[in-house]
């Protein structure tokens, strides 16, 4: 009788150890999406535009001609509190356009998802934290009016970091002659302003 009891106890102990080990391995393999939203800060999310077919970019241009290609650069930098790399996914959604090209600066193409019924183009992307990521987009606006572009991230990033950038689409003879602010110093100043804003929110 004692032998049977000892055997049952040994079997129960072995099963408990096995389950605990399996649970440990599962926890180690969890993605960053399971982390607390406070573990991440979006340190930069900036839109830049080009008037010379993508040779130079600045943040001063807000008006573009209908049915002509818009060259746009988007820069994103997300910081994790533990200093390690984690995967973060997101989307850039733009209405009333025809997509021409979209890719990471590193060369990887971004395939847009077209919602023809609602006239919306969505670009999905995935980045890692603690590294600056740059995306290049080319698209053709097909209507005169304002275009609101929505940049958002997955559930691991707090909603306060979602961003909307608006540009105005006009006819050729209505466009204003605005200089692109393509100076690197001005780009850095924009990033500093964003960082200051985030630091103020923290306080």
Image: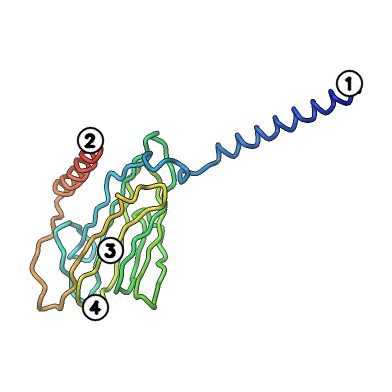
Give the spatial CA distance, label 2 vs label 3.
29 Å
Looking at the rendered image, the disc whose residue lies closer to the viewer, 4 or 2, is 2
- The image's mark for residue 143 is 4
Please name whichever residue, 41 or 171, is drawn nearer the observer in this view of the structure.
41
Return the mark for residue 203: 2
Residue 134 location, x and y as percent? 31, 53
Q: Residue at x 31, y 58 (%)?
A: 151
N-term mark: 2 or 1? 1
- Name the quarter where the N terminus is drawn: top right
| Mark-to-mark CA distance, 3 and 1 | 73 Å
- Count the marks: 4
Foreground pick, 136 / 168: 168
Dot 1 alpha-carbon crowd within 10 angstroms: few under 14, some 14 to 19, many 20 or more: few
First of labels 4, 2 by sequence position: 4
Secondary-structure class at tag 2:
loop
Left or right: residue 26 compared with residue 106: right
Distance (Cα) linking label 1 and label 4: 85 Å
Residue at image point 34% right, 61% down: 92
Q: Residue at label 1?
A: 2
For disc 3, the neighbor class at 10 Å (few under 14, some 14 to 19, many from 20) is some
């Amino acid at each position: 009788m004692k032998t049977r009891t000892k055997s049952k106890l040994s079997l129960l102990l072995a099963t408990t150890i096995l389950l605990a080990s399996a649970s440990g391995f599962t926890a180690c393999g969890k993605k960053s999406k399971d982390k607390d939203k406070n573990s991440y800060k979006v340190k930069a999310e900036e839109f830049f535009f080009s008037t010379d077919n993508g040779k130079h970019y600045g943040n001063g241009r807000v008006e573009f001609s209908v049915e002509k290609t818009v060259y746009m650069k988007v820069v994103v930098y997300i910081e994790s509190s533990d200093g390690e790399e984690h995967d973060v996914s997101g989307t850039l959604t733009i209405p009333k356009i025809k997509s021409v090209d979209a890719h990471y600066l590193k060369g990887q193409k971004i395939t847009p998802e077209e919602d023809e019924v609602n006239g919306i183009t969505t670009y999905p992307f995935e980045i890692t934290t603690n590294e600056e990521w740059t995306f290049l987009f080319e698209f053709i606006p097909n209507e005169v009016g304002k275009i609101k572009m929505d940049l958002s991230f997955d559930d691991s990033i707090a909603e306060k970091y979602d961003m909307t950038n608006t540009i105005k689409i006009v006819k050729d003879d209505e466009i204003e002659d605005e200089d692109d602010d393509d100076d690197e110093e001005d780009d850095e100043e924009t990033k500093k302003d964003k960082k200051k804003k985030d630091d103020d929110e923290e306080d």
